[in-house]
Image: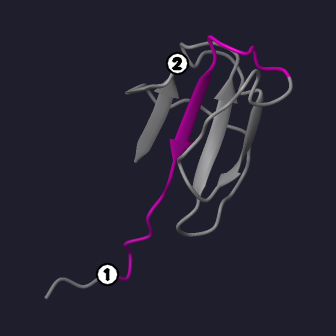
Amino acid sequence: MSALVLGGLPAAAPQAAAADVTCSTSVYKRTFYKNTSFSGSPVRTDCDSTISQTWTGSPVSGVPSNTFGVRWSASSNTANVKAS
């Protein structure tokens, strides 16, 4: 599952390689890009417990204050789920 925000509006984007960060269950992986096309290497990847952000200026060092992209993603381990 993947969600992102571009200039305050939700949008869909293709998956891209992110830094090697592993987040615990029920925590989102948050990846910052210095463009809105999610191209190139991510500037920063970390873990975020809630998708609820309001930034004034640049959200992280190395990312412009506008025209940046953020992708939140989460994985689900359903290997041990039984249907009844």
Q: Is residue 20 left or right of residue 73?
A: right
Measuring from the top left, give residue 47's x and y in whole percent.
Answer: 68, 53
Measuring from the top left, give residue 64's x and y in whole percent.
Answer: 75, 14
Most extreme residue toward the right is: 61
Q: Which residues are magenta?
A: 62-80
Instruction: Say what amino acid the circle numbered 1 marks.
Output: Val
Q: Residue drawn at (86%, 26%), measured in percent from left and top? A: 61
Most extreme residue toward the left is: 84
What secondary structure do most residues of the magenta stretch adopt?
loop
Residue 39 placement: quadrant: top right
Measuring from the top left, give residue 73's x and y in whole percent.
Answer: 51, 46
Q: Is residue 72 left or right of residue 62?
A: left
Read off the residue under disc 2: 7
Does 24 appear in magenta?
no
Question: Callout 1: helix, strand or loop?
Answer: loop
Mark 2 vs 1, N-terminal side: 2
Q: Tag on residue 81?
A: 1
Does 70 appear in magenta?
yes
